[in-house]
Amino acid sequence: MPSVTSRAQASQADPRLHYDALAAVPSTLRIPLAARAFGDAMFPEVAAGDAHAVRMMAELDDDGQTWLEDPACVYGVLARTRCFRDVAQGYLQMQPAGLVVNLGCGLSHYFQWLDNGRARMIDADLPEVLAMRDLLLPPATTRHTQQMLDLRGGDWWPSLALPDRDGTPICLLSEGVLMYLTPVQVHALIHTLGERAPAGSVFAFDALCWLTVGQAQAHPLVRHTAAEFTWGPRGLAELREAHPRVRLAAVHEVMDGFSTGHSFAGSAFRFFTGVPFYAVYVLKVA
């Protein structure tokens, strides 16, 4: 008969237990994972080609149906995946041996698309997420590591041992994260970027506009979790004002390609509010 210790170890090695026990915000990682696993057939024009997602969904015993209910959301995940990938690949063209850091990585594996033989990457997230990554994804290497991260604290830069101003530029990504932080936390994050990052560093993140704050129950997929939207930009100037070294380099409205109606509605929304309803933003450190 297995001992109590061996049974406990076996349970800890079952990623489904971690998956089912995820807290509210980490549980939203199910949405992009399902989209990357099953969305390519729905939207081949923005297919992710994720080599790990289908296998992970099977190991997690999740058929993905709950997270595929809204085709627009599936498209949005795939389109933003391409956008983040393009930003990181553009950075690596300039810095082939550079460092890419994924803040709040969830179960994504961008290194499969970014590994040029020289690049380095840190995937960072909460301990409960890293426990799942250890069971589901390839082991860490000298160029691809995992580290614990909580962006709600102010010490995330030194905790990841990121270079200071006189170092080589780095690329930071944060997908599906900032909308769950408070305005103070987002301001502090961008301020830290401006204060500490080497010149030429880039930071790409996605965000819903401020009108969605407190309205997660209206989102067709996030409503299945207990997460709530707590921040969204009220204006593009808000992203630049956190620190004088920070510049807004690009705004990508990822839903424009979904349909003509989405493109028209997005343009009208931005015209009247001054911000996109949903976009990937790219900041650069001067």
Image: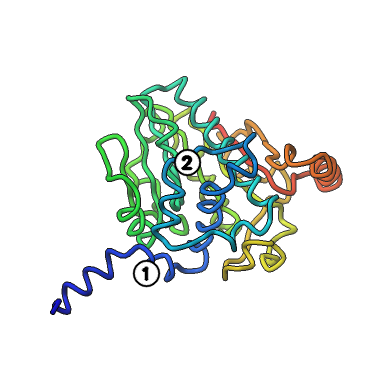
Left or right of 107, for residue 12:
left
Left or right of 230, for residue 63:
left
Q: What residue is drawn where x is 47% and y is 59%?
A: 152
The amino acid type found where label 1 is placed reads: Leu
Residue 86: x and y, percent? 55, 30
Residue 17, numbered circle = 1
Q: Quadrant of the N terminus?
A: bottom left
Quadrant position of residue 267: top right
Q: What residue is drawn where x is 60% and y is 68%?
A: 224
Under circle 1, the secondary element is helix
Q: What residue is drawn where x is 67% and y is 43%?
A: 279
Quadrant position of residue 251: top right
Residue 240 visible in rendering = no
Relative to residue 35, is residue 229 depicted above or below? below
| Residue 34 vs residue 109, the one in the foreground | 34
Residue lying furthest top in this view?
94
Residue 215: x and y, percent? 70, 65
Callout 1 crowding tier (Cα within 10 Å): few <14, some 14–19, many ≥20: few
Relative to residue 249, is residue 42 depicted above or below? below
Residue 171: x and y, percent? 46, 34
| Residue 26 vs residue 48, the one in the foreground | 48
Quadrant position of residue 51: top left
Residue 4: x and y, percent? 17, 79
Question: Closer to the N terminus: mark 2 or mark 1?
Answer: 1
The residue carrying mark 2 is 50
The amino acid type found where label 2 is placed reads: Asp
Left or right of 92, for residue 47:
right
| Residue 125 vs residue 137, the one in the foreground | 137
